[in-house]
Image (cartoon, helix red, strand yellow):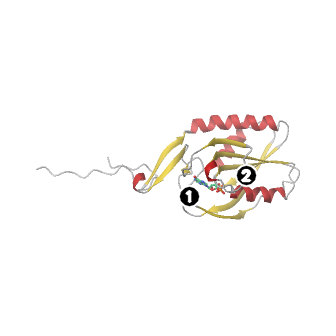
Amino acid sequence: MPKKRKRAVKEKPGHRPGEAVHVLIPNARLKQRIKQMAREIRRDLPDDPLHLIGVLKGSVFFLSDLAQQLGGEVSFDFIAVSSYGKGTDSTGEVKLIKDLDVSIEGRTVLIVEDILDTGLTLKYLLLLFEERHPKHLRIAVLLDKIERRIADLKADYVGFVIPNEFVVGYGLDYDERYRNLPDVSVLRLGPRGKTKIE
Ligand code: IMP
């Protein structure tokens, strides 16, 4: 009997064993929707200089694509908060890690966030920014997991409503990985997510 040769496990670069990603929203669809969102925002605020506040780090690609589509005067700043530990579950506690560089008093501010999940992060940011007296304060989120909401909060502009799945890519991470994937993908962990042996 000829000896059976062991087949090599094929893994996609950057994917760990036991983790698999499945595309949910391809990059082209993200870009198309972001273009529409920019039009909606400019329809509501046609003449105001817009001060975008990106919530680090997940919003970086969204902010970059949105800013390029918004006509008129646009500036940006960034804030960092932590609400998630290393895994896929929120701790429920929001902490300020990095504050804004410049004042938002009297400015038209658009908070740019990757995903609205429990809503606790954005609720915290709304309270923080309202105390600083901006002229207008609006929220744009790329993704909205409505089912998971704890805080009573709605974004003014929503890219996509998505199911209750943990997603990565286009800025979103799992344990700081997968942010660089161009599409938004569902991350599967455990045996179901195991890389297939081909
Ligand atoms: P919230 O405070 O529960 O609304 O969570 C907001 C933050 O949690 C987001 O800015 C993300 O950093 C993170 N988050 C929530 N859901 C996901 C997900 O599916 N993938 C990656 N990060 C997520």
Can you give x and y, in whole percent of width and height, for residue 171 in the image? 60, 50
Q: Mark 2 points at which residue?
A: 153
Compared to residue 149, the image places residue 73 above or below, namely: above
Q: Mark 1 points at which residue?
A: 176
- What residue is shown at x 80% (from left), y 56% (from top)? 129
| Residue 101 visible in the picture | no
Quarter of the rendered structure image containing ligand 1: bottom right
Kind of residue indicated by mark 1: Glu
- What residue is shown at x 56% (from left), y 54% (from top)? 173
| Disc 1 secondary structure class | loop
Q: Is residue 186 left or right of residue 135?
A: left
Q: Residues within 10 Å of mark 2 (few under 14, many from 20)?
A: some
Q: In this view, does 172 lie to the left or right of 68?
A: left
Can you give x and y, in whole percent of width and height, for residue 139 in the image? 74, 47
Marks 1,2: beta carbons within 8 A: no
Separation (CA) of disc 1 from disc 2: 27 Å
| Residue 5 visible in the picture | yes
